[in-house]
Each structure stands twice: as C-alpha cells, then as structure tokens.
Amino acid sequence: MPTSGGGFIRLPAGSVVVALTLPRPGDNGHRVRVLVHAVNRQRALTRLRNLGLRAVYLRGNTEPPTPDEVTAVLHHPDGLVWRETPDDDTESWHPIRALLRSA
C-alpha cells in the first residue's frame, strides 16, 4: 500500500512527526491520514510496518503535517493516530488500533 502523499516535520527536540495519506486497509477507494511521532523518519515507518502496513514508504515531503496534526499526535499517548477524512478538521483523530480492527 504505497503512499500517495506524505511528509514530515522535525520538532525542536529532534524527533519527527510523519504524516501519510494511505488507502484504508481492506477498503478500496477510501483513504486515511495517519500521523506517527517517532525519534526519526525510519523509526516512524518501522512502527507502521510492525502493525501490518508493510508497504508504507515516504517519498518526498509533499504533504507535511499541519500544526494541528502535530498537536494531535503529540497529545496522544501512543503517538500514532489516524482519521478517515484527511481534509475534515471536524473529524476526531482515532487511535491506530481502531483502524486495524476495522480492516
């Protein structure tokens, strides 16, 4: 499941937030925005691959996380969230477990 868009931002403390727009697992046509907070980009992608999203790649920095997205992932205890409608600011962010359960 390769990405169609994504990017990252390095935080002042040196960690990164990676944002990816991915096809929803088990659902053709729908896409989700996934945010990951990690020590570096490679570790962020490894976290997703360890959850079963094996073919996730970050190529370029065309869609970096917005300030609101950075805030959302930093305030989540797992540092890994998603939402169904990437452009809908009214939708809440969900823990990654909810996405993987629905697949």
Image (cartoon, grey):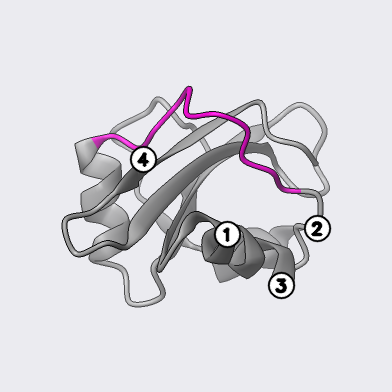
Label 2 amino acid?
A: Arg
- Of circles 1 and 3, the one toward us is 1
- Residue beneath label 1, please? 42
Residue situated in front as seen by the camera: 14 or 18: 14
- Of circles 2 and 1, the one toward us is 1
Answer whether labels 4 and 2 touch (C-beta < 8 Å).
Answer: no
Magenta-drawn segment: 56-66
**Mark 2 Cα-neighbour bin, 10 Å: few <14, some 14–19, many ≥20:** some
**Mark 1 Cα-neighbour bin, 10 Å: few <14, some 14–19, many ≥20:** few
Label 4 amino acid?
A: Glu
Q: Quadrant of residue 73?
A: bottom left
Q: Position of residue 54 (x, y in %)?
A: 80, 58
Label 3 amino acid?
A: Asn
Q: Residue at x 75, y 57 (%)?
A: 53
Q: Position of residue 65 (x, y in %)?
A: 35, 37
- Considering the numbered disc 1 on the image, is that residue within a helix, a strand or a loop? helix
**Mark 3 Cα-neighbour bin, 10 Å: few <14, some 14–19, many ≥20:** few
Majority secondary structure of magenta residues? loop
- Residue beneath label 2, please? 54
Would residue 51 be seen by someone viewing this image from the given angle? Answer: no
103 in the magenta segment:
no
**Mark 4 Cα-neighbour bin, 10 Å: few <14, some 14–19, many ≥20:** few
- Residue beneath label 4, please? 91
User: In the image, 50: left or right of 62?
Assistant: right
Answer whether labels 3 and 4 touch (C-beta < 8 Å).
Answer: no
Q: Residue at x 40, y 68 (%)?
A: 39
| Structural distance between the alpha carbons of marks 3 and 4 | 26 Å
Residue situated in front as seen by the camera: 55 or 100: 55
Would residue 12 be seen by someone viewing this image from the given angle? Answer: yes
What label sits on residue 50 in the rendered view? 3
